[in-house]
Amino acid sequence: MLFGKLRGKMSHDLGIDLGTKNTLVYLNEKGVVVNEPSVVAINKRTNEILEVGEAASRMVGKTPSHIEAVKPLIDGVISDFEVTEKMLKYFISRVHQQNFALVPRPRVVVGIPLDLTEVERKAVEDATKSAGARKVYLIEEAMAAAIGAGLPVVDATATMVVDIGGGSTEIAVISLGGVVTWKSLRLAGNEFDQNIIEYIREEFNILIGEQVAENIKITIGSAIPLDDPQEIEVRGRDLITGLPRAIIISDAQVRDALSRTLNKIIESIKTILEITPPELVSDIYERGIFLSGGGALLRGVDKAISLASKIPVKIATDPLTCVARGTGLLLKDKNLLEKVVLPSTGDK
């Protein structure tokens, strides 16, 4: 018991945004200290972990048959428990090595999607504990994003947050420290990439990879017409000849591709507004909708949502790290943590 307490004091408590695309780790006093792809490269012959994070991500689509670059989370849900545990253990150990604590047993706050089942929540808890955490707190990603954005989540006023991540989009109306109405969509940044892949395959008979699609999205992707139209050269494999081929596509074509998913997200936002109590809707009209997550960086997405909903839309400061910042801030504020934390699956 005494040794456990000593190890706890020597550990750095962490906030973790366990994302489909990226995992972020927040360390109090230092901010986000890890922001790397949720990818692990494994040697299937020896079951050895070769690389984790950025280095493993560079291997995706380029590995020989005995090496596999695994993405252990799909749509915000753990699909490979063992690999997720190893990935978390790597990130937790790395943070403590950098900060001179060699026996990490930290308290960890983890952001999770709104619609996880109890079994899926238990998988997150167990993986985090197996990775070295002595205590795990689960918090809804939308709540963590609102806290990270500095919004008043415990007041008797409504806060509407739309967190567009890599694998899921969380839409939530928050009041008095709880989520009043919500919707979790398995549509987000990864789906935007798939939209571009499918569009180029359908229109040009060319197959491109996920990394190329993501680069197109980041470079010229937008939700509304740009003041200065842009184009980009795209290289892929011609599905008819099987040979490499290059084409030029415009921002208008990319926007057409992205609209398939963006329109579904906008319709879901409108649906949540329709079922939100009138008193809270009036607060939202007055204060606006707040966007977080990597999807908030898509050019003009705030204006597109505002035009469709007739409500002001604001992008949170540094939307990519909102959830991670929120999880970290909760470690500093015990009273707020107690108000918003989800019950542990081990308590039942």
Image (cartoon, grey):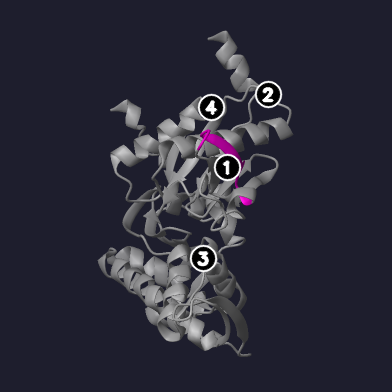
Circle 3 Cα neighbour tier, 10 Å, few/some/many (<14 / 14–19 / ≥20):
some
Q: CA distance from mark 1 to mark 4?
A: 17 Å
Mark in the foreground, 1 or 3 = 3
| Badge 4 amino acid | Gly
Q: CA distance from mark 1 to mark 3?
A: 31 Å
The mark nearer the N terminus, 1 or 4, is 4
At 48% across and 69% down in the image, what residue appears? 193
Secondary structure of residue under mark 1: helix
- Determine contact: label 2, label 4, CB under 8 Å: no
For disc 3, the marked residue is: 210
Secondary structure of residue under mark 2: loop
Q: CA distance from mark 2 to mark 3?
A: 37 Å
Which residues make up the magenta segment?
45-54
| Badge 1 amino acid | Gly
The mark nearer the N terminus, 2 or 3, is 2
At 52% across and 44% down in the image, what residue appears? 66
Question: Looking at this view, is 263 or 314 the one in front?
Answer: 263
| Badge 2 amino acid | Leu
The mark nearer the N terminus, 4 or 3, is 4
- Determine contact: label 1, label 3, CB under 8 Å: no
- Determine contact: label 1, label 4, CB under 8 Å: no
Secondary structure of residue under mark 3: helix
- In this rendering, position of residue 188 left or right of residue 133: left
Determine which quarter of the picture holds residue 280. bottom left
| Badge 3 amino acid | Glu
Residue 246 pos. (x, y %): 59, 82
Q: Indicate which disc residue 272 carries.
A: none
